[in-house]
Amino acid sequence: MKPTKSCFSMFAAVLLLLYAIVGQAQVTAIKAGKLVEPETGTTAISQTIIVEGGKIKAIGTGLTVPAGATVIDLSNSTVLPGLFDAHAHMCQTSPPDNRDLFTVDIRQPSTYRAILGVVNARAMLESGFTTIRDVGNNGNYADTSLRRAIEEGLVPGPTMINAGRIIAPFGGQYHLQPDRRELGQPEYLFADTRDEIRKAIRENIHFGAKVIKIVVDDQQYIYSVDDIKYIVAEAGSAGLKVAAHCMTEKGARNAAEGGVASIEHGFRMSDETLQLAKQNNVVLVGTDFTEQAAGYLGLPPPVAKGFHEVFIDRLKRAFKIGVTMAYGTDVFFAVEGQTRGTLAVSFIDSFVEAGVPAKETLRIMTTNAARLLGVDKQRGALKVGQAADIIATPENPLDNIQTLKQVSFVMKNGKVFKPAK
Ligand SMILES: [Zn+2]
């Protein structure tokens, strides 16, 4: 039978009807007992959030719930924007019996790394992290594939800003031997001259990097202030920011002077360098290891304690000086009975220990990180027009920041990932 004109119009009518039903089903109303705005550190009572098309459409008291909307009752919980981890490594997991990254990395092919990424990304979302910045060590662009799969809805995970391969002076973070110099790849793009640096940045962007990560100072020879300014300009001309891994005071000083977007780790930073970072709007992503997390690295207890104390001292000084901070963890290891998400959220303990107020810690985990990642127009706050990245906790994190370890509900882009019990 030939299709007739009326057949087509009926088909169109059915499509329209389906569209209307599906469109309607996308409206969700969240009843929030308490609603926290991290930017101002304030709490509002009995709020309704209307979510449509993955975004926040309306928010306030006494809002009419649209007919047919799905209602989520969080009236006994505190509702807040999803958390951020600005220093993650999704496609890298060192097993408990081997923390030597060099051997772990060369034994794990990129295909396996992508599978690790799927597992870690799901765990991060489960713990309330709806946006992350992945700063490299992902094999041969397994992170780009993971980001793509998350964006396409193939696998659940946070919104990702990924770094691709890390750009570093020769050797990267490994100590190579001359017969096997290729073993530094594909984790790193070795770039020493200006031409090599420019090419590395372009190659990285071509293969899906959304941020440029550099290692400033893991060798005796380090990137100079001029090198870093050149990197910042070259990445910036393509719209990308630069994250700089800094282990030494000198490396951090060069990065702060060179005007990177963020200094990673920076645990040896002097007060003067912290001051310079503040002046130049450089964000500190401190990866502030708790004593327990330092122990997971396989360090003997006194060494782990000392390592942790250096972080706490720098965290206290950074807070006092007022340098902008964003939450970043650097978890790259597996621990029995824990997930990547539970490990990442445990770094809160360092902020508590350093005496950073809950209000500030929450801002570091949301508002500040969203700005650093360049997604603050879309994420990091519960406001009309923002993506519906919404989590809930049993208590108000402004009263007890530890409640973030018990995230009971997770929505990302308006889709419920972890339903409220
Ligand atoms: Zn790291």
Image (cartoon, rainbow, N blue to C red):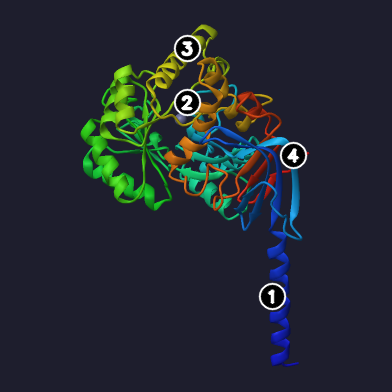
**Amino acid type indicated by mark 1:** Leu
State the SS at label 2: loop
Kindly identify the residue that appears in the image at 30 percent across and 29 percent down.
279
Mark-to-mark CA distance, 1 and 3: 62 Å
Label of residue 125 in the image = none
Tell me if I can see residue 371 in this picture: yes
Label of residue 309 in the image = 3
Whether the residue carrying mark 2 lies under 8 Å from ligand 1 is answered with yes
* Residue bearing the label numbered 4: 75
Foreground residue among 195 and 395: 395
Instruction: Find residue 404 and report its image quarter.
Output: top right
Mark-to-mark CA distance, 4 and 3: 40 Å
Instruction: Estimate how packed mark 3 is, as few (under 14), some (14 to 19) or many (20 or more) residues with alpha carbons within 10 Å.
Output: some
Mark-to-mark CA distance, 2 and 3: 13 Å
Mark-to-mark CA distance, 1 and 4: 35 Å
Residue 161 placed where, x, y %?
47, 44
**Amino acid type indicated by mark 2:** Thr
Give left or right: position of 161 versus 413: left
Residue 263 placed where, x, y %?
37, 30
* Residue bearing the label numbered 1: 16
Give left or right: position of 52 versus 212: right
The label nearer to you, 1 versus 4, is 4
> Compared with residue 138, is residue 377 higher up or lower down, i.e. above or below?
below
Mark-to-mark CA distance, 1 and 2: 51 Å
* Residue bearing the label numbered 2: 287
Contact between labelled residues 4 and 1, with CB atoms less than 8 Å apart = no
Most distant residue in the right direction: 421
The label nearer to you, 1 versus 3, is 1
